[in-house]
Image: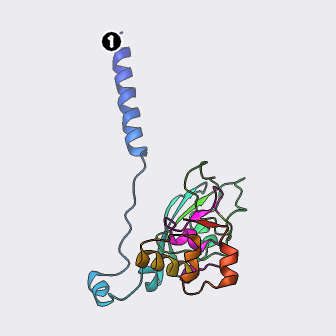
Amino acid sequence: MRALAVVAVVVALVAAGWAWRSRPQSEPVAPLVSESTAAASVNAPSASGFGELVVAVAGKVRKPGLVRLPAGSRLADAVQAAGGALPGVDVALLNPARKVTDGELIVVGVTPPPGGPAAPRGGGAAPATGPLNLNTATLAQLDALPGVGPVLAQRILAHRDQHGGFKSVGDLRQVDGIGDARYEQLKDLVTV
């Protein structure tokens, strides 16, 4: 009886040790430039201007986590750097040719929950949960709208910051680069 108790304790300790060693561990991301170089380039817009960017790839990929890519990389490059999509995963909603931005989260093969925040789809489609709120949208979400690239998305964010948000969808016409044709294209895809 006593030997059985000793064996049970040893098995429990081995299992606990194995569980401890198998736990997920975060991997620190080293800075892209030294402190002195960063201080010398205060006017640089982001780390992506230095030739490298870091994106998070999550969902149904072989190696989810942070990946480093050269500036100008596409979504397909990020998924490939994460080991590729798992077999049988539908990637039809992802636009493999879309350029990724530093700090972006790319979710592969996971549908956003109903009523939850919609992830950028990358294909120029409206979010699946309804119109995109101009006052809460991220750069990546705005960039995913049809006819809106990263430059125009940044202008929309700058206008929002300068004017304390959008009061109506019509305020979108005040953003430099949004004319009548583009406004007509966007007005039903956004809200305030």
Three-letter amino acid code at disc 1? Arg
Which stretch is magenta?
127-151
**Which residue does the image show at 43% across and 45% down from the upper left?**
22
The reply, left or right, for residue 90 in relation to residue 33 is right
Residue 30 visible, this orientation: yes
| Residue that appears at 70% across and 82% down | 181
Q: Is residue 16 left or right of residue 166?
A: left
Q: Nearer the viewer, residue 78 or 190?
A: 190
Magenta stretch, overall SS: loop
The part of the image, by quadrant, that contains residue 20 is top left
Q: Read off the residue under disc 1.
A: 2
In the rendered image, residue 37, in percent from the top left (x then y), is placed at 31, 87
Q: Quadrant of the C terminus?
A: bottom right
Q: Is residue 7 magenta?
A: no
Residue 70 visible in rendering? no
Rendered location of residue 161, percent (x, y): 42, 75
Q: Residue placed at 45% from the left, 85% from the top?
A: 49
Label 1: how many residues lie within 10 Å, few (<14), some (14-19) or many (20+)? few
> Measured along the vertical axis of the image, is residue 146 above or below residue 91?
below
Q: Position of residue 190 (x, y in %)?
A: 61, 67
Residue 5 figure quarter = top left
Q: Secondary structure at mark 1?
A: helix
